[in-house]
Image: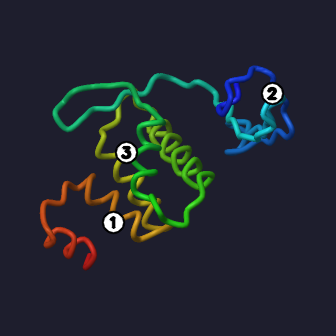
Amino acid sequence: MKCPFCTNKNTQVLESRVVEDGKSIRRRRECGKCGKRFTTYELVKGTALWVIKKDGRREPFEREKVKRGILRAIEKRPISLDLVEDVVNQVEREMLKKEKEEVSSRAIGKAVLFRLKKIDKVAWLRFASVYLQFEDLEDFAKAIKN
């Protein structure tokens, strides 16, 4: 495993922990060169999951794309990166439980919104403004009121 800070290949595992009901392993690592610590996750590569976009296009499900959307929504909010990773894991697991090879982007967005609303209302509103395509202040007001 390469260090994400200095790209050195000499890293040491400090701690391993089974997470997500045994579906993945979380490892704390330390770089032998720069001494910085980082976390990695080992996930079982499941069946390919495809996302059906609003315009009908299909593309592979990308955890990182979901994570980027959440990270934009939580910017400057007191939310840990571990919690973001948990949300991404929960959303991916929910989509895989549907036991379908294809899921709609709408289903993914709803799953993220559901979790963000419990965590942070501001992050929820930010994500909703993009996901629900708010066009003006009235759209924000309606979302807040509901």
Q: Tell me the distance, in whole angstroms, between the alpha carbons under discs 1 and 2.
A: 40 Å
Q: Secondary structure at mark 1?
A: helix
Q: Position of residue 110 (x, y in %)?
A: 35, 53
What residue does disc 2 label?
11
Image check: 144 left or right of 91? left
2 to the left or right of 111: right
Kindly identify the amino acid type of the residue bearing the numbered disc 1.
Leu
For the C terminus, the image quarter is: bottom left
Amino acid identity at mark 2: Thr
- In x, y percent, where is residue 114? 41, 60
Q: CA distance from mark 1 to mark 3?
A: 16 Å
Element class at badge 2: strand
Q: Which is more toward the observer, 70 or 112?
A: 70
- CB atoms of marks 1 and 3 within 8 Å: no
Position of 61 relative to 137 (above/below): above
How many tags in the picture?
Answer: 3
Whole-number angstrom distance, CA of label 3 to CA of label 2? 35 Å
Position of 133 relative to 63 (above/below): below
Say which label, 1 or 2, has the lower sequence index.
2
Of marks 3 and 2, the one in the foreground: 2
* Sooner in the amino-acid sequence: mark 3 or mark 2: 2
Find disc 3 in the rendering and name its residue.
Answer: 108
- What's the residue at 34%, 57% (across, down)? 127
Q: Amino acid at mark 3?
A: Ile
Q: Is residue 64 positioned above or below 144 on the image?
A: above
Residue identified by numbered label 1: 125
Q: Residue at x 80, y 27 (%)?
A: 11
- Of the numbered discs 1 and 3, the one sitting upstream in the chain is 3
